Structures are given as structure tokens and as C-alpha cells.
Image (tube, helix red, strand yellow):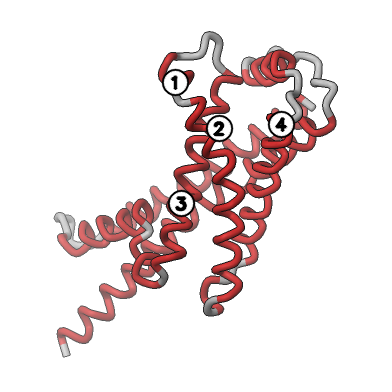
Amino acid sequence: MPIIAYCVYAAFCWRVIFHALVWYRAAMELGRGTGRPHRGSLRIWTETAADVLLFRRLLYENGLLWICAWTFHVSFLLVLVRHMRYIMNPVPECIAGLQPLGLFAGYILPLSVIFIALIRTTVRERYVSRSNYFILGLVFLIGITGLLLHIFRSDLVGVKEFTLGVFTFSPRPVPQSPLFVVHFLLVLLLLLFLPFHLFIAPVIMHEARKREAGLKRMLHER
């Protein structure tokens, strides 16, 4: 199991570096030309940031889906913060204080996935994406297995020793819980796809903004 985790870590880092280089290349190409600051370029970057961080385009298209997406991402973040206790020793007070909120978010997360999936399958075709469905399915399974681990009270001491050992490159025995093994493997699988999903989407949005700006400029000149 630790070997699988380390392979996933290596693949994760490689993909992060690769897509960071894509971002850097896009920024360099954007800066070429006149050799001076370009207000249009700055505006495009600002609008892209708003699209990525605030889901602005989604808000204009479907308000209900926008609310569900925000609920999904906030609950996912709180669950992630809650799980930081398994890779920290001692656990900071700020992380310990958010544990109840993270537990509540653990119940909200699968529900938000269900609502997003329902909305995506009942509205127009433009919301349908196989990659998004795959990631949503993974998050749903991770959320459900995580809740089951909490309900059936797995060996939290053994889980923390294992995860902390993997994180610090000092492997410990895998907990004797098939449910935990499934949960952990699902998390590793999600980790493999997160960089691609997080990095490519902003680049696509940025390119869309550039095309829109170019089209508006051409229409204005005519």
C-alpha cells in the first residue's frame, strides 16, 4: 500500500509541474507583442480569475447549479481540513477546532454531489461532461466510505499511524479494515486526476476569454 501511495505522489507532482509549465507558457505568450503592459490582457486575467474562483459563468447560466457547486467545494474543503489531523502530530488548535464543522460537511458533501449530478442530467447538454461525472463519482464514493468509517468506528489510532507514516516516509502496517483500504485507494485515485482537473479548466477559461475579447475588438473596429 505505501508503494502505491508513493507512486501516486510522484505522478501527482509530475502533473502539477507539467500543468504549471502550461500556465507559465500561456503567461509568457500573453506578455509578448508590444513589450509594454496590456490593459486588455490584465482584464482578461482578472475575468478569468473571477470565473475560476467565483464560478461567475456558472452563476449566469444556472443559479441553482452555482449554489450546489459552492456547497460542494466548501464542504470538500472542510472535510479536507478535518482529515489533516491524520498527517499532523500534534494537531494544531485551529484544525482541532474545525473538527465538528468538518464532520458536518462530511454529511453534506455526498448530498451536494447528488444534487449536482441531478441538475447536470436534467438540464441542457452543455453541462454534461464525462470527466466531471467521473470525479463526482469518486468524491461521492469517498464521502460514503468515509461516513461508514465514522459510523462503524474504525481503529483511528491505527489509521493515523499508517497515514502519518506514509506522509513522513516511515511506513506503518496497514489497518485491518477493508473499508479503510477502499477509502484510501479511492482517495489516491482522485489525487491522480485532481491536477488535470484543476489546472486545465482555468487555461480553457482563459483561452475562451481571449477569444471573446478578440471578437469584441474586431466588431468594434468594424
Q: Residues within 10 Å of mark 1 (few under 14, many from 20)?
A: few
**Residue for badge 1:** 97
- The amino acid sitting under disc 4 is Ile
Q: CA distance from mark 1 to mark 4?
A: 21 Å
Q: Earlier in the sequence, mark 2 or mark 3?
A: 3
Query: Looking at the figure, which quarter contains the C terminus?
Result: bottom left
**Residue for badge 4:** 151
Whole-percent x, y for residue 188 in the image: 69, 38
Q: Is residue 115 above or below residue 22?
A: below
Q: Earlier in the sequence, mark 4 or mark 2?
A: 2
Whole-percent x, y for residue 212 in the image: 30, 75
> Image quadrant of residue 106?
top right
Query: Which residue is painted at 60% across and 66% down in the image?
Result: 118
Query: Looking at the figure, which quarter contains the N terminus?
Result: top right
**Residue for badge 3:** 22
Q: Residues within 10 Å of mark 4 (few under 14, many from 20)?
A: few
**Residue for badge 2:** 103
Q: Earlier in the sequence, mark 1 or mark 4?
A: 1
Whole-percent x, y for residue 132 in the image: 59, 60
Q: Secondary structure at mark 1?
A: helix
